[in-house]
Amino acid sequence: MAGTEPFVSAALSPSGGHVLTCLPHAVVVWRSADLGETATYKLPPSHASVPLCSVTVDGSGSHAVGAGAGGLLALWSLRSHLLLKLLEVPGGSAISQAAWLPAPRQERLALVCADGALRFVVPSADEVVGTLRPRGGRGGGCGFRSVAADPLGRAIAAVCSDGRIALYSLEGG
């Protein structure tokens, strides 16, 4: 599969033993030691035309999420190799980045959406539990472009389209 089309996103398993890459139509898992392909996860035929643009792995290394157009999230088990769930985030805004939040919030994903919002989702419950939008900004048209979580789960940092950096505390919720 490598070399046929460009990868659009990558993630490392918590152990560092695997690299996950995202193609527009699949998530591919590779051994870090020799970059040998170990698994390929594809969307079902009903969603095969929906391009994926981000991949992330949970803190236990047991689940991966591919995210993409139309607010689609695909949750796979890295242990059983099964597609566990397809979820369309309300609002239908394309997702440009998905990131699992570390413990104690490991069941939540932070999603950078094309409408500029940062949404927090609990995939197991099919639920959006929060939405953030950048405050103010030059020209009023700013939105989030990227997000990163503190490894201890205390805060997230987000980059805004107008060049600002926003830091949010996750303490208390």
Image: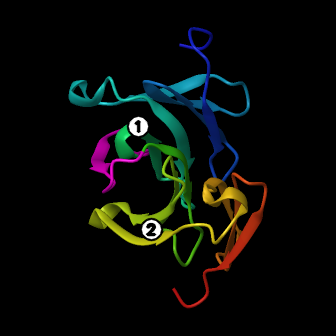
Which amino acid lies under the numbered mark 1 shown in the image of this protein? Ala
What residue would you read off at disc 1?
69
Q: Kindly indicate whether the residue at mark 2 contacts the one at mark 1 (C-beta within 8 angstroms).
A: no
What residue would you read off at disc 2?
107
Which residue is more in the foreground, 169 or 85?
Answer: 169
| Residue occupying the far bottom of the picture | 172
Inspect the magenta stretch and tell me whether residue 79 lies in it.
Answer: yes
Instruction: State the image coordinates of residue 27 (x, y, percent, origin top left).
Output: 48, 31
Q: Which mark is residue 12?
A: none
The residue depicted at 48 percent of the width and 25 percent of the height is: 24
The residue depicted at 55 percent of the width and 91 percent of the height is: 172
Which residue is more in the foreground, 167 or 33?
Answer: 167
Tag in front: 1 or 2:
1
Q: Secondary structure at mark 1?
A: helix
Q: Secondary structure at mark 2?
A: loop
Q: Report the magenta residues as a range.
A: 77-93
CA distance separating discs 1 and 2:
22 Å
Residue 165 left/right relative to 63:
right
| Residue occupying the far top of the picture | 4
Which amino acid lies under the numbered mark 2 shown in the image of this protein? Glu
